Amino acid sequence: MHILSIIISSVVTLFFSMIVAIIGNIVGIGGGVMLLPFFIFYLHLNSIAASGLSLFTIVISTIGGTFAFIRQKTINYKLFTTIISLIIPGVIIGSIANKFVNTQEFKEILPLWVITIGIFSLVTAKKHPLKNMKDSENDSIKHSKLTKIVSFISGFVSGFFGVGIGGVMGTYLVAVEQISARIAFSTLVMVMTITSLFGFFVHFESAGLNLSSWIAYLIPLTLGAIFGSQIGAYISKTSNTKTLRLYQGYVILSLGISLLIVNFLNLIKI
């Protein structure tokens, strides 16, 4: 019975990881906002372990997505180098700060943050015109100081919550810097490969899981993320770039509301 439960859990983890990777690579959000509730509420892991595994899955998913987007030539390398420098320190500081928040507080904070990002993403997507890829190939950062601040905040959020940077940084790049959604999301997938890797190593030290436990989770997570990233990158390529931002906002907002519902049900013990 114990072996059967492990097999079932592994299969569920694999398919969930694949679905998350598909959605994450389509809308450029990494997928952490979907992975965290799965790890905390379904696998019953503490917040540090959940964040570490979430970041690992994002690493695998974004590596696969990055190679796909390189082949599609939708990554802006100048944009990548501009935002990466302050995101990494933010990830490190956020990952360390996560250690001082217990699991219950973590569950209460996360839904509010996710809903805020989702609402902001939808509002800005509807107010600002979305550029086509051809109009944005040579776009550069217009607000250098603000971009550095947002980059640091995005990194901190990624490290603290164990999520990708797409929710904050993607919304900023499209709404404020007026960069094509497809180029912004493709570039951020590449950035998330680096930021999530830093956060994962920080969480790994203090996650409280033994090696066998990590392997049991990592194998299905890896397989699901690899297959899902390729599917998601293909769907992103064939989708209308003007709708990608709206998809992102709706996905994030829906996840935040779902987290609130789960927290409420746990509170009243239904």
Image (cartoon, rainbow, N blue to C red):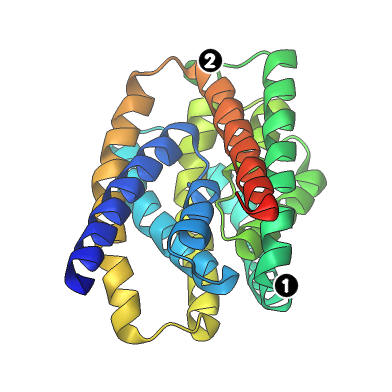
Residue 262 is tagged as none
Residue 155 vs 216, above or below: the answer is above
Q: Give the crowd class for mark 1: few <14, some 14-19, many >=20 residues within 10 Å.
A: some
Label pair 1/2, CB-CB below 8 angstroms: no
On the image, numbered disc 1 is attached to which residue?
101
Amino acid type of disc 1?
Val
Q: Is residue 46 visible?
A: yes
Q: Nearer the viewer, residue 25 or 177?
A: 25
Residue 157 vs 137, above or below: the answer is below
* Percent of width and height locating residue 106: 69, 63
Q: CA distance from mark 1 to mark 2?
A: 38 Å
Q: Nearer the viewer, mark 1 or mark 2?
A: 1
* Percent of width and height locating residue 257: 65, 36
The numbered mark, 1 or 2, whose residue comes first in the sequence reads 1
On the image, numbered disc 2 is attached to which residue?
242
* Percent of width and height locating residue 109: 74, 55
